[in-house]
Image (tube, grey):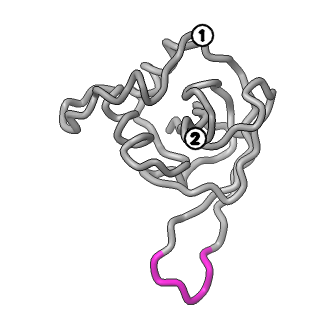
Amino acid sequence: MPFAVKAEIADPRATSFMFTAQKTMYGGKYIAAGDTVYVFASEHEGGKGLIARGTAVSAALLPRLPGIARQTPRVSVVIRRSAAVLRPLGRRQLVSFSDWEDGRPETELNFKLYRQATNKIVGLTDGAATFLDGYF
């Protein structure tokens, strides 16, 4: 399963990215070493959307804290960059895809990454991954 990470990125040109205790949604907790990951620099934190494709080098699901009933699963992951984006793709390009039932990869990305403003790791369909590959 391919994944996407939307987070604050200090150095968009880095050869690797480390995310500690990152929130997960839509199957993001299943990320594992060897998985393909698309990295989005959060626009809320000065980023410009999709910046890189890479491979998860390591991934560890953090244990839940005792005594807290509802917890979002969190993962720490290291991603090694394999490609840099060639053209822009971010909130501006995806915001118009809001018919949640149309099955388009753009709509899936808008829903999973931008419907809620939080930074996160999400699982993607193969169709969304194929669409994203067109940006590299």
Q: Amino acid at mark 2?
A: Val
57 or 136, nearer to the observer: 136
Q: Residue at x 64, y 61 (%)?
A: 61
Does residue 36 appear in the picture of this structure?
no
Residue 29 image-quadrant placement = bottom right
* Circle 1/circle 2 CB separation < 8 Å: no
1 relative position to 112: left or right: right
Q: Residues within 10 Å of mark 1 (few under 14, many from 20)?
A: few
Q: Is residue 13 above or below residue 42?
A: above
Callout 2 crowding tier (Cα within 10 Å): few <14, some 14–19, many ≥20: many
- Asked whether residue 72 is drawn in magenta, I would say no
Residue 109 seen from this side: yes
Secondary structure category for the residue under label 1: loop
**Residue 21: quadrant of the picture:** bottom right
First of labels 1, 2 by sequence position: 2
In the image, is 10 to the left or to the right of 4? right
The residue that disc 2 covers is 5
| Residue bounds of the magenta highlight | 64-70
**Percent coordinates x, y for residue 95 in the rendering:** 34, 30
- In the rendered image of this protein, does residue 102 appear above or below residue 65? above
Q: Main secondary structure of the magenta part?
A: loop
Residue shown at 45% from the left, 20% from the top: 130
The residue beneath circle 1 is 86
